[in-house]
Image (cartoon, grey):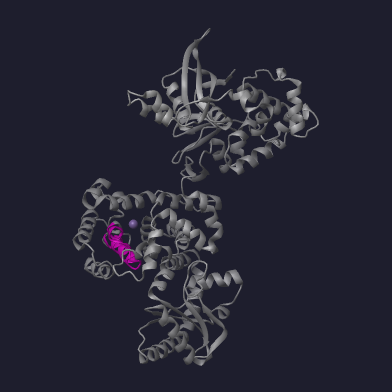
């Protein structure tokens, strides 16, 4: 009975394991999947059991083991996440839910590398807990092991998906053991011919190599035993895929690669490592330049071991890696080892314990990773800002995921899919509802870009609102294609709109000296050229108003406003209200600006405006709504809002422009 084996093995490193709980999870999974069969004809329960067995090697905690048993329950059985939570608690439910969510990550074989990149990031982003990723990796490993029972086409797709998404993630987390298993299986399905050829070559070479390795192991073991050193000596052949990669990357022949034998010696402590090194050098002459002490000076990724290459049996160059159990575990399981070592009752050393505490959260762990895994620098560089709060993940109607920075708008999304889509974008359909192309998107949005052939060029004012450099680049490119006359017209339009926002309603009424101010600042010949440059996107939009008016001219004198929190608090004290306000008020200077809005009246419009401003942390001080004379469908809103600075006012404008049914708005003086 496999559950007995699992309990026995888990108890080795989890002395306080709740056997009953683990058993209950196993039985629950068995019952839930009753009658279901895997593609290989085995009862379904064999799959979650294998997944748990794979993660046992990583010494995962009790909750993770339980989640392994239950990982397919939500998706494939009538039981719900509630059932799981009731029986096994919040933590297990969180893990199971996380794993279920990850199965929504959809891969297609014709994806561009940028899309694959987004997919990987999305995967990490939505996992949020290292354990969820580990379960998913183990799940995939077992599915890969049983892939022969699936039809050919699906085999290739799953193998490619594993290679493109799962292997890099296993690599990123430093879970080498899972990584190389996954990789070899992918290799088998993606390049079957090369795999067979290489397997044959390795096999031909194996008897010879195995004899050498066995003799070496025996010799070392015997000597260590004689002087009373306990050690595990292990000689493993190189993985097929790693040989294949070397051949492809370096253009080497098989014979050139396979000349190095590697033997690993694992002992109980640091000191013994050095003693073993001495023993090995007394048995075999070392190659002088090939002794490396990564214990005293660990590698950049934290890897620790003593390495030495010696002339081994029959003079065959042989590499020895000598390390402690702890170092070995870390080398094999990377970041996962830090996560799960804390579950060990017998902590090896106090410093190690402190180290684990430091790395207790997923966020920190990945930040740590960035520093550690230098080899993955590009991927990590991309991850730095991406995994967490400053990225959003938006879906196309086909389910492809696009990752964008926080605050990105529909136009950013459109350009990330295709230049044409961006250039001709007129509206968005976001989660089924139509809205403006400048709408700010959120994680989980499903967005369709509606285009029109009549819109030949991107709009100049988009430059002001987009968040990605890709969109900026594409828009500028397109704008530069215009003739100077078109540029001039676009620039004039842009300036009209821009001045209108700030309460100047005719570009002609802009005084000559103001025009001169701009011409001089941007070092252009004349006003005409200035407008041209604005039109082709060469002049940064945020600098224009800033150079035209002072802060005071636009915002007026600061109105000192007490912090809302302090005011509320002061209300409780009836005796000395005035004194309280003075004592607690924050002396932040707010500016009160009056805005005029023309809107199409509808239910919820004021609420929508209110939400937009609240999101920007902008207080509405006063609102006044009135009908427009002559027109029954539109209303006027005059409102006074409180802003801290010019930038915030700009954000208010952006927010209003993407609010549905706000037709016009400007600053009132
Ligand atoms: Mn599964």
Estimate the x, y position of residue 247 in percent, counting from the top left. Answer: 57, 72
**Residue found at x 56% / y 86%:** 287
425 horizontally vs 212: left or right: right
Q: Nearer the viewer, residue 510 or 192?
A: 510
566 horizontally vs 192: left or right: left
Considering the image in quadrants, where does the C terminus appear? Answer: top right
Q: Nearer the viewer, residue 512 or 311?
A: 512
Asked if the magenta segment contains residue 224, the reply would be no
Residue 33 placement: quadrant: bottom left
Considering the image in quadrants, where does the N terminus appear? Answer: bottom left
Q: Is residue 234 visible?
A: no
Q: Nearer the viewer, residue 382 or 638?
A: 638
145 horizontally vs 595: left or right: left
Q: On screen, 118 above or below 621?
A: below
Q: Nearer the viewer, residue 243 or 569?
A: 569
Estimate the x, y position of residue 632 in percent, counting from the top left. Answer: 49, 10
Q: On screen, 433 above or below 370?
A: above
For ligand 1, the image quadrant comes to bottom left
Specify the segment rendered in magenta. 45-66
Specify the farthest residue to the left: 20
411 horizontally vs 616: left or right: right
Estimate the x, y position of residue 173 in percent, counting from the top left. Answer: 45, 61
Q: Is residue 107 visible?
A: yes
**Residue found at x 45% / y 59%:** 166
């Amino acid at each position: 009975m496999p559950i007995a084996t699992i309990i026995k093995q888990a108890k080795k490193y989890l002395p306080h394991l709740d056997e009953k709980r683990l058993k209950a999870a196993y039985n629950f999974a068995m019952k839930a999947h009753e009658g279901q069969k895997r593609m290989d004809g085995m009862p379904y329960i064999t799959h979650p059991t294998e997944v748990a067995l794979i993660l046992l090697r990583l010494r995962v905690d009790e909750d993770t083991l339980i989640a392994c048993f239950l990982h397919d329950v939500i998706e494939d059985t009538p039981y719900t996440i509630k059932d799981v939570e009731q029986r096994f608690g919040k933590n297990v439910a969180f893990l199971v839910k996380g794993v279920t969510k990850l199965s929504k990550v959809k891969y297609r074989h014709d994806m561009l590398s940028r899309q694959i990149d987004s997919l990987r990031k999305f995967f990490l982003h939505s996992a949020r807990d290292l354990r969820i990723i580990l379960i998913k990796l183990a799940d995939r490993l077992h599915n890969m092991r049983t892939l022969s029972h699936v039809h050919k086409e699906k085999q290739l797709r799953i193998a490619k998906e594993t290679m493109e998404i799962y292997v890099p993630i296993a690599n990123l987390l430093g879970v080498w053991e899972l990584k190389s298993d996954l990789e070899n299986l992918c290799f088998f399905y993606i390049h079957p011919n090369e795999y067979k050829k290489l397997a044959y070559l390795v096999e031909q070479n194996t008897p010879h190599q195995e004899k050498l390795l066995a003799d070496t192991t025996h010799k070392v073991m015997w000597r260590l035993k004689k002087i009373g050193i306990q050690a595990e000596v292990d000689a493993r052949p190189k993985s097929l895929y790693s040989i294949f990669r070397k051949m492809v990357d370096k253009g080497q022949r098989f014979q050139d690669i396979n000349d190095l034998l590697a033997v690993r010696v694992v002992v109980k402590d640091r000191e013994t490592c050095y003693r073993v090194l001495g023993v090995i050098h007394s048995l075999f002459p070392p190659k002088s330049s090939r002794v490396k002490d990564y214990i005293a000076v660990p590698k950049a990724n934290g890897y620790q071991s003593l390495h030495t290459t010696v002339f081994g049996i029959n003079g065959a160059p042989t590499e020895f890696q000598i390390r402690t159990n702890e170092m070995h575990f870390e080398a094999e399981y990377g970041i996962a080892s830090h996560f799960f070592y804390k579950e060990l009752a017998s902590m090896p050393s106090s410093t190690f314990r402190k180290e684990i505490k430091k790395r207790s959260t997923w966020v920190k762990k990945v930040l740590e990773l960035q520093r550690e895994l230098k080899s993955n620098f590009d991927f990590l560089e991309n991850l730095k800002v991406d995994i967490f709060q400053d990225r959003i993940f938006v879906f196309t109607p086909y389910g492809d995921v696009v990752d964008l920075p926080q605050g990105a708008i529909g136009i950013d999304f459109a350009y990330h899919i295709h230049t044409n889509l961006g250039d001709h974008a007129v509206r968005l359909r976001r989660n089924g509802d139509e809205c403006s192309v400048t709408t700010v998107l959120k994680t989980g949005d499903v967005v369709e870009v509606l285009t029109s052939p009549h819109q030949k060029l991107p709009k100049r004012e988009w430059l002001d609102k987009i968040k990605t450099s890709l969109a900026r680049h594409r828009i500028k490119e397109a704008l530069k294609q215009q003739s100077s006359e078109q540029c001039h017209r676009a620039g004039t339009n842009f300036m009209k709109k821009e001045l209108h926002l700030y309460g100047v309603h005719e570009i002609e009424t802009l005084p000559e000296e103001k025009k001169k101010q701009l011409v001089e600042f941007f070092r252009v010949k004349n006003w005409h050229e200035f407008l041209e440059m604005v039109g082709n996107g060469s002049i940064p939009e945020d600098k224009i108003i800033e150079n035209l008016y002072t802060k005071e001219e636009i915002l007026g004198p600061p109105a000192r406003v007490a912090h809302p929190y302090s005011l509320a608090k002061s209300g409780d004290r009836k005796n000395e209200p005035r004194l309280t306000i003075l004592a607690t008020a924050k002396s932040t200077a707010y500016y009160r600006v009056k805005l005029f809005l023309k809107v199409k009246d509808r239910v919820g419009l004021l609420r929508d405006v209110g939400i937009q401003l609240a999101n920007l942390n902008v207080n509405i001080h006063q609102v006044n709504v009135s009908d427009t004379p002559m027109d029954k469908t539109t209303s006027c809103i005059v409102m006074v809002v409180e802003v801290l600075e010019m930038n915030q006012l700009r954000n208010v404008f952006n927010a209003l422009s993407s609010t549905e049914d706000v037709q016009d708005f400007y600053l009132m003086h």
